[in-house]
Amino acid sequence: MAGPFDSAADEVDARGAIVDRRLAQRLLRFLAPYRREVVLSVVLLGVISLLEVAGPYLTKVAIDNYVRPARHGALAGDATRGLIGIAVAYVAVLAAAFALRYVQSYMMSMVGQRAMRDLRLDIFRHLGTLTPSYYDSRPVGQILTRVTQDVSVLNELFAQGVVAVLGDLFILFGIVGAMLWLDWRLALVTLTTVPLLILATAAFRARVRVSYRRVRTRLARINAFLQEHLQGLDTLKFFNAEEKETRKFDRANRDHYDAHVQNIFYYAVFFPVVEVIGALAVALILWYGGGGILAGAVTFGVVVAFIQYAERFYQPVRDLSEKYNMILSAMVASERIFELLDTPPAIPEPPAPRPIGRLRGEVEFDRVWFAYKDGEPVLRDVSFRVAPGEKVAIVGATGAGKTTIANLLCRFYEFQQGAVRVDGVDIREIEGKSLRRGIGLVLQDVFLFSGSVRANIAFGDRDRGGDAVERALAEVGGSRIAARFPRGLEEEVGERGAYLSMGERQILAFARALHYDPSILILDEATSSVDVETERAIQAALRRLLHGRTSLVIAHRLSTILDADRILVIHRGELREQGTHAELMEHGGIYARLHELQYRRQPTLETAGAPGNGSGAQA
């Protein structure tokens, strides 16, 4: 059975091989500001590789120059002093390698952290350029996976992967060079096992890549599931759906487990194969080197050194296999990150935006068509004009397109046909930030950020000081909110305003919009969650504050918009009626029926339809 968010994950699984070179080039750009540290680290690894190669050679010197001569009658004192010198040199080599490896590891860890800091900042900055349509089609958990876990994987790559791979390659080349220098014939015999190693590595690489893709995509699926269900925990418990949703999570969790087990299986097979190939190389050294010793063609010290070199040769190979795991994970993570960074905003900014100052507040919709999905228009040929300072209410059934009008005016979505103008300028010619600087938006579902009451009201601060926050809160009747808190406006609101009631959150949203001082104010069901007394206070404040300010009020409760200069009635995506409350009531059309149904306490507005056709408004 398909689990939640399977389609997105399976799409990632089904794609072809990652273009390693292209991704690697883009990743290296984040190391460019720290090229000096990277170059120094590479130099240190070159020195470390020479020190790694020196150990077996010192062993060879000790055996051939001091141990064997002493057994054949050489002076014991000279041999002892020589062995002490070799031992001191060996310890010095180990100490120097340790110190240099510490410096190199610390340096690259710092580089990795700085590069990831830059990458996270780029991702967050880019997320701010994307419009709501991008987030509508993607679970937030998947996006969080890219910003957190995928970036952490890249940190491991930069800190331990890229440069460390060069270090392993330096050691491999150094070992091969030392073996060829000591005895090229024995070196060639030893290296006859390399083709077997290449074949095993190629088979391992082909299988583990697919496996690691599955691990990452199933992890993103789990994160998306958790994020959604933690946010909806109250609903989950209310409907007693814990067991059912636990079974869904168990399927997603088991898919992730199975992918990990498959990945572990490949490594469990590969590492013993490498050990067997290494043992085969040592056996060849004993066979060919032993024959050389008997024939007098090879010294005993050379054979011992070759055995040590063979063991050290396969250690970097094992390390490279581990790092391949890291690199593969990083390639998958970078593919997902750059897919996010390469996502262009659904609404492109104009190449040469028209400068605008403070808006006068004129709004015009000219034959606008819009659909969230192709072939399913939400707005159909909608045209109207709002004069500067005019208060216009928009009413209609759920799904009629009221909130869509606000979204289009704020440039959150791109309409397909027609034009939307502000002060006579097509909004497609205005930079999005400049346009929204003149628009205030208060939604029914208020979003507050963690922080103080003051910080939330001044969220869109335009460097206004003094008591501007206190004045904005007082003007919407919210002084009692600050009065009930021990710390006043410095009181924490909690995550998404958890410490406040819904009504208090909406009052703060009013104060935030008014503190922003917009020319156009959009209220989308903004008083639906406040009590009658608070609503009266807000309505009184709004009548005062909306004077000279263009306002669009979207409402289901018709009692809140009776004093509007004009009322637009949206029905099934079309503008069907407009006029004052009295004019529309006298007309006896859709609005009059909505008013009658609401005041008779009929179930909902959705049951109201156009007169004469007997149909309800589109839900």
Image: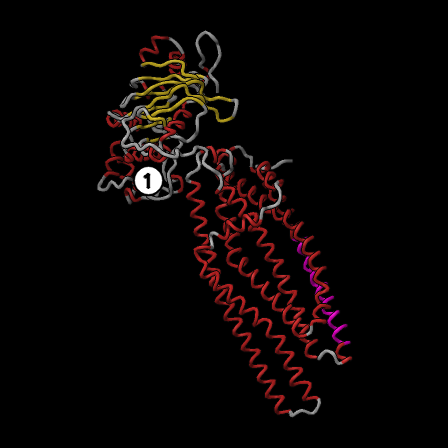
Q: Nearer the viewer, residue 614 or 108?
A: 108
Q: Main secondary structure of the magenta part?
A: helix
Give the image quarter of residue 190: bottom right
Residue 105 versus residue 12 in the image, above or below: below
Where's residue 420, x and y in %?
38, 24
Horizontal placement of 387 versus 11: left or right? left
The residue positioned 37% from the left and 8% from the top of the image is: 588
Tell me how many marks there are: 1
Horizontal placement of 458 versus 575: left or right? left
Q: How is the image coloured?
A: secondary structure
Where's residue 576, x and y in %?
40, 14
Residue 288 falls inside the magenta stretch: yes
Screen quadrant of the N terminus:
top right
Residue at the disc numbered 1: 459
Highlighted range, magenta: 264-291
Residue 85 falls inside the magenta stretch: no
Q: Nearer the viewer, residue 432 or 521?
A: 432
Q: SS for tag 1?
A: loop
Mark 1 residue crowding within 10 angstroms, few (<14) / some (14–19) / many (20+)? some
Where's residue 482, x and y in %?
28, 39
Give the image quarter of residue 240: top right
